[in-house]
Image (tube, grey):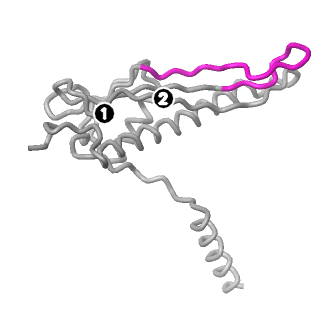
Amino acid sequence: MNRLFRASLLLCTLALSACGFHLRQSAALPPWMQRMHLTVSGGGSLQRDLARALEDSGVTIEEEGGPGIAELKIPVAAFDTDTLSVSGGARVTEYSVRYQVRFEVDDSNGQSLVALQRIDMSRDFSYDALNTVGTDAQIEEIRRSLNDDMVQAILFRLQAAGRHQLAEPATAPGAG
């Protein structure tokens, strides 16, 4: 029995690794992003979750900007709900929850380290006008999911900017 269990566990492990499943890891951010001040329009869960993810990646979140502190600015973080389809009785049957975020990173002198970027995400869901019990909870869960995915997308973009040094100027903090 014990041998069968071990063989099953090994088979499951191999199947998960073969399908491309990997646990999310923290982002490897460049030295000029190791101290950061975060400004999010409206604050809320995006600011909290992004700050936590940045800290997990080794970034020190500073209360104020200053010398050697990168400024991650998010002037737009907005949800919107759109109607996708309407039934013959003029009842909405599908919605789309959209999430748009724009962000940029500047150094302490206002020099652009990562140019303004826009990320759009959306999730669609069906709506039954005769059974509205879970709609608000469903929309809230979709928003939470989009927020989690947005945090990861921002981290991946910051990591890519650092890895490829696409946006790093020659006078980045710590350089030269």
- Residue at far left of view: 176
Residue 66 coordinates in the image, percent (x, y): 16, 27
Quadrant in which the N terminus is drawn: bottom right
Q: How crowded is mark 2: few (under 14 residues within 10 Å), some or many (20 or more)?
A: few
Residue 175 coordinates in the image, percent (x, y): 13, 43
Q: Main secondary structure of the magenta part?
A: strand
- Residue at x 23% of width, y 39% of height: 168
Q: Residues within 10 Å of mark 1 (few under 14, many from 20)?
A: many
The amino acid sitting under disc 1 is: Val
The amino acid sitting under disc 2 is: Ser
Q: Give the range drawn in magenta.
A: 76-96
What element does badge 2 sit on?
A: helix
Where does label 2 land, which residue? 45
Q: Is residue 25 above or below residue 175?
A: below
Where does label 1 land, which residue? 114
What element does badge 1 sit on?
A: strand
- Residue at x 43% of width, y 25% of height: 102
Residue 122 coordinates in the image, percent (x, y): 61, 31
